[in-house]
Amino acid sequence: MIEASSLRLSELVGIAYLLYLAAIALVVRLPLVRRVGVWLAAAAVIVANLAVARPGAPWIVVALRDWLPGVVILIGYYATGAFYVAPSPRVEAWLKSWDDRLIGRATFDSVSPGLRVYLELVYDFCFALIPAGFAVLMWFGGSADRFWTIVLIAEFIPFGTLPWLQARPPWVIEGRRATDTMAMRRFSLLWVKRTTIHANTFPSGHASGSLAVALALAQTAPAAAIVFAVLAVSIAIASVVGRFHYALDAITGLLLAVCVWGAAVLLGL
């Protein structure tokens, strides 16, 4: 029997989030197949974390344990998607009202082609930022548990609001734009349709998680952290320019990452 004390803080965060989803699945109306899927996801995360937390495990298990939270993020993301049933007109109107205040009626069609391609690329491949950041951390000998604790919390808070704040991404509502005919843009839309849960997260998990990676690297690899911070801000901008997120999603996502990192520093993590 493995005691809870042998689990890392980041592992407890992952387990806690999946248990949160499992508990919600008991009380909200969901198709049975979705409900069971959430419970199976929670069970898989618990079993996997307990399995790799065995004392005296071989080096391959230790290495797997270091990378496992990245898989837990994906499991948590898709398990959260099971709760997306229908958009709330009130939530969408609220997010749109903030767009009107922050960016007006901008369509961003005037953005230069080169900058647009860059923004589409960083957004499309933002999923690679987390494992890339962790690889850098490992190269410089940083704490895997600290890194994943910061990143998981920054990701799971935006995911965790989805069952209660359901909305469609702006690009779904606003329809086609002139720039949607560009090859890079068509790829981005196809990528989003094939790989995401087709729901908006508030705050933006992309913005929050990406900046959390940069901040989690600041102590161990400050030069690399600056590069990752530039990419994180680029991803946040790209999410708004590409209309994958509302402006308020991106802004609150960045602020959330700073708050999570600040709390970690204050608590001595």
Image: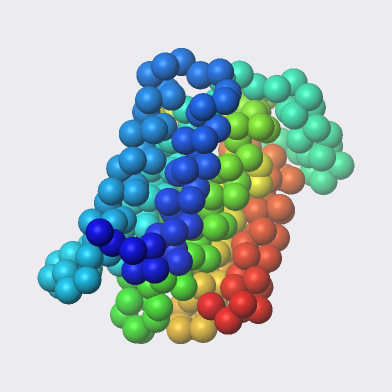
* Relative vertical location of residue 233 with respect to residue 137 in this rendering, above or below: above
In this rendering, the count of numbered labels is 0
Residue at the image position 42 percent from the left and 23 percent from the top: 34
Viewer-closest of 116 and 9 = 9
Left or right of residue 4: residue 255 = right
Q: x, y percentage for residue 96?
A: 78, 32
Indicate the quadrant containing the N terminus: top left, top right, bottom left or bottom right. Answer: bottom left
* Residue in the picture at 18% in, 65% down: 61
Counting from the top left corner in percent of width and height, residue 75 is at 38, 42
The residue lying at 34 percent from left, 49 percent from top is 46
Position of 75 with respect to 168 (left or right) is left
Instruction: Tell me which colouring the rendered structure shows.
Output: rainbow
Nearest the camera: 83 or 123? 83
Q: Residue at x 53, y 52 (%)?
A: 155
Left or right: 9 with respect to 205?
Answer: left
Which residue reaches farthest front? 1
- Which quadrant holds residue 258? bottom right
Which residue in the rendered view is the most extreme toward the right? 101
Residue 172, position in %: x, y?
A: 60, 24
Q: Is residue 31 above or below residue 184?
A: above
Which quarter of the figure has residue 154? bottom right
